[in-house]
């Protein structure tokens, strides 16, 4: 009985370790990310890690009825050195900006 419990405990420990090892690798993401931009555009750049990133912005219309729109750039590979850019359409200004991440 003791041998069976020890074997079961070892199997559970091994399965748990493998499960968490898989989670750690799946949770990898871009690192060193920053955003920038001006009144009508947004930029994003990630200097390391794995996966992909993009720039996004919420654009607010500068006149009545003050609509909002969401814009996003194409995906860039983390660590590529490329800067992602996105622009608001004419008559809109950036009200918030950020960087989107994907594995």
Image (cartoon, helix red, strand yellow):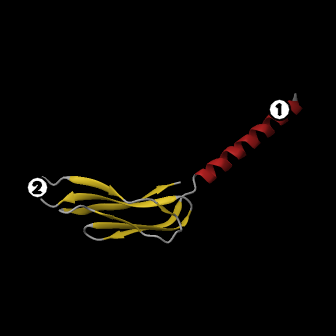
Residue 33, compared with residue 20, is above or below; it is below
Give me the disc on residue 5. Answer: 1
Which quarter of the rendering shows the N terminus? Answer: top right
Please tell me which residue is depicted at 75% across the width and 42% down the height of the picture.
13
Q: Does residue 86 appear left or right of residue 54 in this picture?
A: left
Percent coordinates x, y for residue 7 in the rendering: 84, 35
Residue 84 position in % (x across, y down): 41, 66
Q: Secondary structure at mark 1?
A: helix
The disc label shown at residue 60, or none:
none
Which label sits in the foreground, 2 or 1? Answer: 2
Q: Is residue 17 left or right of residue 77?
A: right
Percent from the top left, x then y, of residue 34?
A: 43, 68
Mark 2 surroundings: few (<14), some (14-19) or many (≥20) residues within 10 A: few
Q: Earlier in the sequence, mark 2 or mark 1?
A: 1
Mark pair 2, 1: CA separation: 72 Å
| Quadrant of res 66 | bottom left
| Residue sticking out furthest to the left | 64
User: x, y (%) of residue 36?
Assistant: 36, 70
Camera-side residue: 98 or 41?
41
- List the residue tagged with mark 2: 64
Q: How many marks?
A: 2
Image point (12%, 59%), residue name: 63
**Residue sitting at 52 percent across and 69 percent down?**
80
Camera-side residue of 16 and 71: 71
């Amino acid at each position: 009985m003791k041998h069976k419990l020890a074997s079961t405990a070892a199997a559970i420990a091994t399965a748990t370790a493998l499960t968490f090892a898989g989670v750690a690798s799946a949770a990898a993401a871009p690192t060193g990310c920053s955003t920038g931009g001006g009144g009508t555009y947004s930029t994003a750049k990630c200097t390391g890690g794995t996966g992909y990133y993009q720039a996004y912005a919420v654009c607010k219309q500068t006149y009545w009825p003050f609509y909002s729109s969401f814009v996003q750039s194409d995906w860039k590979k983390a660590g590529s050195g490329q800067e992602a850019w996105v622009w608001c359409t004419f008559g809109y200004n950036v009200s918030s900006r950020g960087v989107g991440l994907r594995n």
